[in-house]
């Protein structure tokens, strides 16, 4: 990435940060500018940085009225976390977390994850503007998860592995249904966006690996577009 491209990236980040802070002018200069340039050089997509800013700002203002706007430095942890999630999803090198650090993070229990899946998928379908075939599939998967909820409690060994595998399969089914029923022009546009996000990795990855990353990146954007809940249990 050239210095001009880095500066353009920084200005876009700065503009988004100002909008999220209610129009307050927040200049990304000095160490903050170098921080954002480093994100650009690492190949972190602008979309990921903006989503991280959104998360940081929303969490900050959810605590009550604030007198000071959020600076870009405060968003670094969320940028790193979301970039790591994006990297694992599309299959490119993770920015910062070692395998040990990733393994040490604890998420919800399997039972809690199944319950969240039921709640989120039910709420997703209830919006009423979903593609009919995908909505019908969501109904079937919710019913299946409700039936599996009791089995998840105390599940061990092969039974636990079977349930975790089924969650992954259900997630793949939902995403495939979206892909098959979404408007073709939307899919083309999202693929172009995914290719742009991955552009800095094209020369560093074998062609086959890049295509897999491109497919995964397109699916990720499709999921985001339709706000489809994630069912996979990590």
Image (cartoon, rainbow, N blue to C red):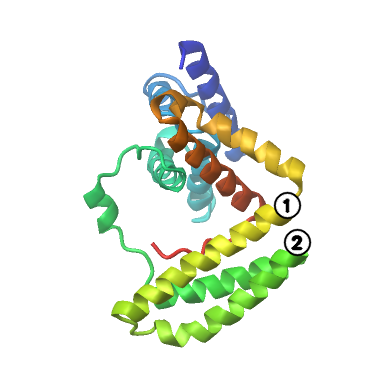
Q: Which residue is more in the foreground, 84 or 191?
A: 191
**SS category of the residue bearing label 1:** loop
**In the image, 123: left or right of 215?**
right
Q: 207 or 76: which is nearer to us?
A: 207
Which quadrant is home to the C terminus? Answer: bottom left
Residue sitting at x 59%, y 74%: 141
Residue pushed farthest front? 208
Gap between marks 1 and 2 measured at Cα: 8 Å
Q: Residue at x 35, y 77 (%)?
A: 160
Q: x, y percentage for residue 96? A: 31, 39
Q: Give the residue number, with chain letter if any, for mark 2.
A: 131
Q: Which mark is residue 182?
A: 1
CB-based contact (under 8 Å), mark 1 and mark 2? yes
Tell me where residue 51 appears, x and y as whole percent: 53, 43
Mark 1 nearby-residue class (10 Å; few <14, some 14–19, many ≥20): some
Query: Can the viewer see residue 116 in this picture?
Result: yes
Q: Position of residue 82 (x, y in %)?
A: 44, 45
Residue 129, given in percent of the width and then of the height, sits at: 77, 62
Direction from residue 120 to residue 137 in the image, left or right: right
Dot 2, crowdedness within 10 Å: few (<14), some or many (≥20)? Answer: some
Label 2 residue SS = loop
Image position of 11 (left or right of 130): left
Which residue is found at the position 59% from the left and 28% from the top? Answer: 15
Tell me if residue 62 comes above or below residue 26 in the rendering.
below
Foreground residue among 75 and 37: 37
């Amino acid at each position: 990435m050239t210095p001009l491209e880095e500066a353009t990236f920084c200005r876009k980040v700065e503009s988004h940060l100002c909008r999220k802070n209610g129009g307050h002018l927040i200049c990304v200069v000095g160490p903050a500018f170098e921080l954002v340039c480093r994100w650009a050089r690492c190949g972190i997509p602008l979309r990921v940085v903006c989503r991280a800013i959104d998360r940081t700002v929303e969490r900050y203002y959810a605590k009550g009225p604030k007198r000071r706007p959020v600076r870009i430095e405060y968003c670094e942890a969320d940028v790193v976390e979301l970039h790591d999630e994006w990297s694992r999803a599309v299959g490119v090198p993770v920015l910062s977390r070692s395998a040990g650090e990733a393994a040490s993070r604890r998420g919800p229990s399997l039972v809690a994850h199944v319950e969240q899946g039921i709640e989120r998928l039910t709420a997703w379908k209830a919006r009423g503007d979903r593609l009919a075939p995908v909505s019908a599939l969501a109904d079937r998967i919710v019913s299946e998860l409700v039936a599996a909820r009791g089995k998840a409690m105390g599940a061990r060994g092969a039974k636990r592995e079977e349930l975790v595998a089924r969650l992954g399969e259900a997630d793949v089914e939902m995403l495939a249904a979206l892909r098959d029923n979404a408007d073709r022009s939307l899919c083309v546009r999202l693929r172009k966006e995914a290719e742009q996000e991955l552009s800095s990795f094209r020369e560093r990855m074998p062609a086959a690996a890049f295509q897999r990353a491109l497919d995964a990146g397109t699916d990720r954007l499709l999921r985001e577009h339709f706000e489809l809940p994630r069912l996979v249990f990590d």
